[in-house]
Each structure stands twice: as structure tokens, then as C-alpha cells.
Image (cartoon, grey):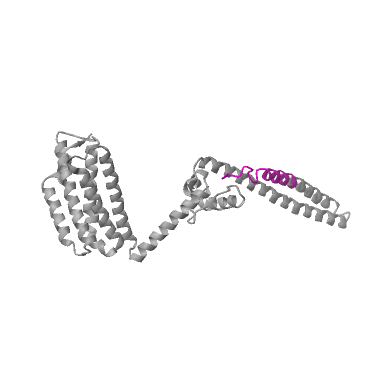
Amino acid sequence: MEIYNRRTPGSVTGIVFLLLGISGVLENISDMWVNFTLGKEIQKLDQTLARDSFLAGCFEGVFALLFLILAFAGVVKITRVIRFWRIKRILGDRAMISLEELSRKLHCSQKRLRRELEKMIQHNFFLQGHLNQEYTCFIVTDRRYKEYQKILSEWKREQSYWQEKGFDEEKQKVVEQAQNCLTEIRSLTERICLQNQTDFGMEADLQKLEKGVKKLISACRHDPQNLPQMSLFLNYYLPTAEKFVREYAWIADGEQTGDNREELRRELFKGVRELAEAFEELSQRLCDSMESDIFDDIAALEKMMEQREKGGYLGDRKKVFKRG
């Protein structure tokens, strides 16, 4: 189905209106000037004829104004057609574009552009055009607009879920950041597995780590009361786990070189395994046993991390290797 009108509305009528308007303005202004001049000349000779001449001049002025409006309408139509062609060129093969980008490239305000797009949609320049509810983007096809509506519906449903669970905006942000961290861990795990560098059982440990993290984040998503207890996990240990996995991925890709490369690999492997076991235990206690008091487990995890820092890895890892 076509998305643009092949017979661009206003491309012909705009030129006709402009030409008729200009010719009508010029003709009526000329006749008005003649009538006023004639009225002045014969005013002393014949008052009635002079008055009729002045009235005729006034009528000519009214018609000149009407033709001026017609010419202006033609200019508006032609300008809209030119802007439509420019929008088509900017869009190219895209089905959606932000109003901010479009207004910047057209050198006009977003408010004015929004009104113009509404007029174009109303006059069938865009056969499937839509402006989203927040007026932040212009969508050219019905298919993409349906996808947008589906995403918007899911987003509203998720916002309703957050509100029902008692999450405010700050708590939502904490959980979303943790979810992004989990996504990165999952992506790095797949990358490591594809490199066939999962010696010493690293693949099993990575999967265990991912599973534990997923369950802990799930516990936070379903009950905001768990967030205070899990703040240390969310703000420190989870990013640390991501850092361990990322640096191991760098080694697997051959992006880290140095004399102590194998030693670093073993250290990272050990750190991932300890974190995986700790997260698994934490998630089992919190999610399976539904015990809310997990401070002992957090303390044990913190003690383990302190021991690793004393071992020199966390503080001096930059001295052990250099990135290639």
C-alpha cells in the first residue's frame, strides 16, 4: 500500500491560486487607482459622478484584497508542497523520525512543524501518516504505528505494575539498572562460550552466576521491600560480577596480553566461581525459602570480597596485565 500521495495535493491548485491572485490584485489595484484619480478630477464638475467613481474604487480595493488572500492561499499551498518534498527526502527509507530531528533539518520550530504535519495528514499528503500521542515523532506507516501502540500499551501496563507493587521512580531506576547489568552479563557469557574459552568449568559457573543474579533481581522487581536489604548486592557486588565477566571476555578474545595472562585468567575464574556460589546461595535463601533476613549472607559475601582485595587482584589488577 502506498504511503505517499502520488498526486501531491496543492501542486497545481497552488500555482493557479497564486497566478490568479497576483493578476487579480494588479488589475484591481490599477482600476482602483484609475477610479480614485478620475473621481478627484471630476469632483468639482459632477459630485454624483465623482461619488460613483470613489465607490467603484472602493469595490476594486475590496476585490484586490480578496485576490491578495487568494494569492496568499496559493503561496501556502506551494510552500506546503515544497516542505512535503523536503520531508520525503529527509525520511528516505525510514518509517519514523523524531520531530526534533525533522524540525532541525527544516529550520522551523517543532510546534509549527507539528501543525504542518497535521495539515498534511488531513489533506492526504501522507496516506498512512501518524503523530504519536506525545507528539515527539512522526510515523509514516500504519504497520510501524501499530508496533508503537503495542509498545506503548506494554509500557503503560508495566508502569501500572510498578505502581501496584509500590515502586516509585527512584526504585524503578535501581531495578532497571540491575536488569541492564544482567543483560550485559548474559551477552558476555554468550560471547565467552562462542570463543570456546570455557576451560576449568567456566561456562557452568557463568550460567550459575547469571541464574543467581536473575533470581535476585526478580525478587527485587516483585517486592520493593527487598530493595533496602539488597542495596549492597545491587550497587556493588552485581557491578563487580559484571566487571569480572567482562575482563574474562577480554582475555578470551585475546584483547589482554602480558606475562601474567594465565595467572590473571585463573584469578578471574576463581572470582567468578566464588561470586556465582554466593549469588546462588543468596537467591536460594531469598527466593526459595522466602527468608527476608539475609544480612548474614551479605556479610559473608562482603568478607569474601575483602579477602580478594587483600589478595591484590581488585586493587592492583592493572599492574598484572595491559590491554593489547
Q: Which segment did they paint magenta?
A: 1-24
- Residue 270 lies, in percent from the top left, at 15, 45
Q: Quadrant of the N terminus?
A: top right
At a point 28% along the width and 54% down the height, the residue shown is 178
Camera-side residue of 311 and 183 = 183
Decide whether residue 2 is among the magenta residues.
Answer: yes
- Residue 211 lies, in percent from the top left, at 25, 52
Q: Specify the quadrant of the image occupied by residue 225.
A: bottom left
Decide whether residue 290 is among the magenta residues.
Answer: no
- Residue 4 lies, in percent from the top left, at 58, 44
Is 274 positioned to the left or the right of 176 in the image?
Answer: left
Camera-side residue of 188 and 320 = 188
Camera-side residue of 271 and 309 = 271
At a point 47% along the width and 48% down the height, the residue shown is 100
At a point 22% along the width and 46% down the height, the residue shown is 206
Q: How many marks?
A: 0
Is 10 positioned to the left or the right of 23 in the image?
Answer: left
Q: Quadrant of the C terminus?
A: top left
Q: Residue furthest right?
A: 45
At a point 33% along the width and 59% down the height, the residue shown is 172
- Residue 54 lies, in percent from the top left, at 81, 55
